Amino acid sequence: MISRYEFQFSFFSHSITKIAITIAAVLTFSHIVVQLFSQTIPDIFWPVFKDIGAGFILVAAFGFALSWFLRARPHNRPKQYSVVAFDIDGKETVLPGLRTEFRNHDVAWSFMKQYKEAYPLNNFALVSDVKKDRKKVMFRYI
C-alpha cells in the first residue's frame, strides 16, 4: 500500500514533469516560430521582393523619361514676326518709315523697344501667325 507521503511525492513529481514538458514544448515551438519568421521566410521571399522593387524603380524611371520626352518636344516657332503699332485709343495704325517684318524674335523685340522710345505715345505689339489661322498671336506688348 502507498503511504500518504509517497502519494504526495508521486503527485508532486508528476506535476513537475508535466510543467517541465509544457515549458519545453512552448520553448521548442517558440524557437521554431522565431526561426521560421526571422530566417526561413525572409530568405525565401527577399530575392523576390528585391526584384519586384528593382522592377518598380525601372518602370517609374522609364515612365518619367517618357513623359519628359513627350513634353520636351520642340514647339512650333513662327518664321515671321510683325510689329504692329497702336495709337492712344488702342486702334491699329501705320507709322511711315518703320520696319515691321522680321524673321527673328530678338531683333523684332529690339526694334520694338527703339520704336517705343521714338514714339512714346504709341504702343507696339509683336505678333505672328503660329497656326494657319486668321488670327495672329501676340507675343509681347509695350
Image (cartoon, rainbow, N blue to C red):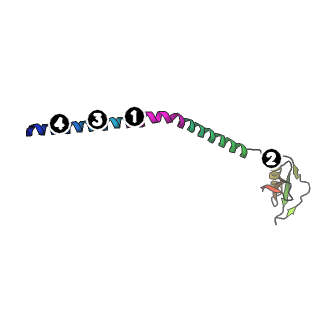
Q: Which residue is mark 3?
A: 24
Whether 83 is among the magenta residues is no
Q: Main secondary structure of the magenta part?
A: helix
Tell me the SS state at disc 3.
helix
Q: Which residue is mark 4?
A: 13
Whether 45 is among the magenta residues is yes
Mark 4 vs mark 2: in front = 4
Circle 1 residues within 10 Å: few <14, some 14–19, many ≥20: few
Circle 2 residues within 10 Å: few <14, some 14–19, many ≥20: few
Instruction: Point out which mark residue 35 bears.
Output: 1
Q: Quadrant of the C terminus?
A: bottom right
Q: Earlier in the sequence, mark 4 or mark 3?
A: 4
Q: Earlier in the sequence, mark 1 or mark 3?
A: 3
Image location (x, y in percent) of residue 34: 38, 36
Query: What amino acid type is highlighted by mark number 3?
Result: Ala
Mark 1 vs mark 2: in front = 1
Rendered position, 45 above or below 74? above
Q: Which residue is mark 2?
A: 106
